[in-house]
C-alpha cells in the first residue's frame, strides 16, 4: 500500500524597500521561513548552495511573490522570516504576523495567501561582500 503525502502551499506577497532611502529594491531574490508556535513548518530559500537565485526576484517596484511548500496543512503562521539577498549580502527579517502587518486570503484548505500590508524595510549590509 502506498502512502500519500499531501503538499500544501502558502503564497507570500509584499514589497521590499531600502530602509535608508525608501527606494524599491529590484532584482533581489526573496525567500521565506514560515513559523507556527515556534516551529519551522515551511521554507523557501532565496538562493541555492551556489548562491544562485532559486525563486523569482523582486520586480522594479520591489514587489515579490513566492510560494512556500510544506507537507502539513497550514494554520495561520504567527511569524514569517523573510530572506532577501542583495548585492551578495543576505538579510533576514522576522515579521510578527497580526492584523497590522498582514492579511490572509483563505481557500477551502485554510490560508492560501499572506499579503504584507506595508512595505518591508531592508537595512543595508553591515559589511559589503
Image: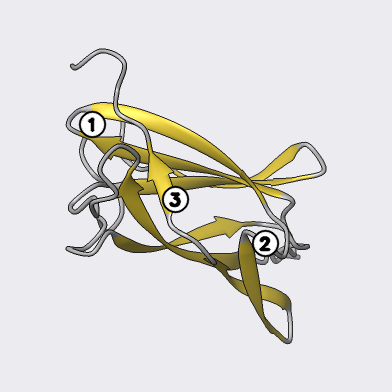
Outermost front residue: 21
In front: label 3 or label 1? 3
Residue 49 in sight from this viewpoint = yes
User: Are the residues tagged 1 and 2 within 8 Å (C-beta)?
Assistant: no
Left/right of residue 119 with respect to residue 29 in the rendered view? right
Residue receiving disc 1: 51
Q: What's the distance in space between the residues labelled 1 and 2, CA to CA?
A: 33 Å
User: Which secondary structure lies at badge 1?
Assistant: loop
Q: Position of residue 114 (x, y in %)?
A: 58, 67
Residue depicted at 19% across the width and 54% down the height: 26
Q: Residues within 10 Å of mark 3 (few under 14, many from 20)?
A: some
Outermost top residue: 127
Q: What's the distance in space between the residues labelled 3 and 1, CA to CA?
A: 23 Å
Residue receiving disc 3: 120
User: Which secondary structure lies at badge 3?
Assistant: strand
Mark before the other along the chain sequence, 1 or 2: 1
The answer to which quarter of the image holds residue 117 is: bottom right
Residue depicted at 34% across the width and 62% down the height: 64
Residue depicted at 35% across the width and 43% down the height: 46
Amino acid at each position: 500500500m502506498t502512502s500519500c503525502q499531501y503538499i500544501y502551499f502558502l503564497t507570500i506577497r509584499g514589497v521590499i524597500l531600502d530602509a535608508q532611502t525608501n527606494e524599491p529594491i529590484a532584482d533581489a531574490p526573496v525567500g521565506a521561513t514560515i513559523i507556527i508556535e515556534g516551529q519551522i513548518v515551511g521554507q523557501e530559500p532565496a538562493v541555492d548552495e551556489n548562491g544562485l537565485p532559486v525563486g523569482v526576484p523582486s520586480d522594479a517596484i520591489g514587489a515579490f511573490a513566492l510560494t512556500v511548500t510544506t507537507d502539513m496543512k497550514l494554520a495561520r503562521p504567527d511569524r514569517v522570516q523573510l530572506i532577501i539577498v542583495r548585492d551578495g549580502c543576505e538579510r533576514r527579517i522576522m515579521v510578527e504576523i497580526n492584523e497590522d502587518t498582514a492579511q490572509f486570503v483563505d481557500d477551502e484548505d485554510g490560508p492560501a495567501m499572506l499579503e504584507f500590508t506595508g512595505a518591508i524595510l531592508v537595512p543595508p549590509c553591515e559589511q559589503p561582500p
